[in-house]
């Protein structure tokens, strides 16, 4: 699934862009989730805590918060450096102002269908390649038939209860169907460790480690099974060394 945001205060333009994306979706045989924002303000609110989008198609000339200010809001969080920002405008005199927000590309209105296909295809290829290389920092989960993207830096720990995963983040808890074994495969390349048959913990949120359990920064106690004691200790010490 590729998650794309369209931010443009012109309804006819957003409809045209959405139509082009659906055609691209069909041509590439991929799934694209599209969210539309009709103002810079509404887009900025959507990324207040984290940005769930892979690609943002941003108009520049908008009332209120324009596309450049919205782009600056996006880039203010280093976690959003991965987001591919593509600007769309009727004018070409914005290149100097766009430098600081690191756009992936620029398209001029009216949008040329061939140019749109080429640039979006390149952006999607980049995202797919990045995911294959294990550079995504988002954990995708499925809840009630809907995909939710969780920034891995926000995850405290995961707990398995029967067939349910209780995922605890800095913002609260999410419950969904799944297994820790499958989630562990998505998380092993990051700073996570399996402490127990029922627990996976984010190393960055550990406060104290003992032989039988560890304490998180929220004072939650997580058990460490006897066969995982050495692994947990080694992974934690390695993580601590890499901080300095």
Image (cartoon, grey):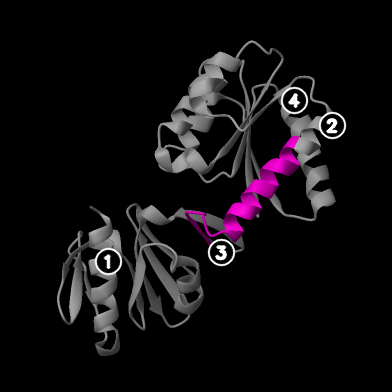
Up the image or down, 155 lies above or below 126; here it is: below
Q: Is residue 226 magenta?
A: no
Up the image or down, 10 lies above or below 182; here it is: above
Up the image or down, 162 lies above or below 61; here it is: below
Q: Which residue is mark 1?
A: 238
Residue 73 found in image quarter: top left
Q: Disc 4, disc 2: CB below 8 Å?
A: no
Q: Nearer the viewer, mark 1 or mark 4?
A: 1
Query: Residue 211, can we see it?
Result: yes
Q: What is the spatial separation of the Cα atoms under label 1 and label 3, in whole angstroms? A: 32 Å
The picture places residue 189, in percent across and down from the top left corner, at: 45, 65
Picture residue at 25% right of the left edge, 68% below the top: 236
Q: Nearer the viewer, residue 230 or 211?
A: 230
Q: Nearer the viewer, residue 133 or 107?
A: 133
Q: Which residue is mark 2?
A: 113
Q: What is the spatial separation of the Cα atoms under label 1 and label 4, in whole angstroms? A: 51 Å
Up the image or down, 38 lies above or below 29; here it is: above
Nearer-N-terminus badge (1/2): 2
Q: Please, what secondary structure does the residue beneath circle 2 have?
A: helix
Q: Quadrant of the N terminus?
A: bottom right
Mark 1 nearby-residue class (10 Å; few <14, some 14–19, many ≥20):
few
Q: Which residues are magenta?
A: 119-140
Q: Nearer the viewer, residue 114 or 45?
A: 114
Mark 3 nearby-residue class (10 Å; few <14, some 14–19, many ≥20):
few
Q: Which residue is mark 4?
A: 13
The picture places residue 229, in percent across and down from the top left corner, at: 24, 82
Nearer-N-terminus badge (1/3): 3
Nearer-N-terminus badge (4/3): 4
Residue 58 found in image quarter: top right
Q: What is the spatial separation of the Cα atoms under label 4 and label 2, in whole angstroms? A: 13 Å
Residue 142's mark? 3
């Amino acid at each position: 699934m590729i998650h794309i945001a369209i931010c443009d205060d012109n309804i006819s333009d957003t409809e045209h862009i959405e139509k082009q994306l659906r055609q691209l979706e069909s041509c590439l045989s991929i799934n694209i989730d599209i969210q539309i924002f009709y103002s810079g303000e509404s887009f900025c609110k959507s990324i207040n805590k984290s940005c769930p989008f892979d690609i943002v198609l941003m108009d520049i000339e908008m009332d209120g918060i324009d596309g450049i200010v919205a782009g600056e809001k996006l880039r203010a969080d280093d976690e959003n450096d991965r987001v591919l920002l593509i600007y769309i405008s009727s004018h070409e005199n914005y290149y100097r102002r766009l430098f600081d927000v690191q756009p992936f590309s620029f398209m001029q209105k009216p949008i040329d269908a061939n140019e749109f296909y080429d640039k979006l295809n390149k952006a999607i290829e980049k995202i797919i390649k990045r995911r294959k290389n294990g550079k995504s920092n988002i954990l995708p989960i499925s809840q009630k038939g809907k995909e939710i993207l969780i920034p891995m830096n926000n995850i405290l720990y995961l707990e398995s209860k029967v067939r349910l995963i209780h995922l605890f983040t800095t913002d609260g808890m999410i419950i969904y169907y799944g297994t820790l074994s499958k989630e562990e495969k998505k998380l092993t390349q990051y700073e996570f460790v399996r402490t127990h048959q029922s627990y996976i913990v984010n190393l960055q949120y550990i406060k104290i480690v003992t032989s039988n359990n560890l304490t998180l920064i929220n004072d939650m106690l997580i058990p460490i099974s006897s066969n995982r004691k050495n692994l947990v200790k080694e992974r934690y010490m390695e993580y601590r060394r890499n901080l300095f």
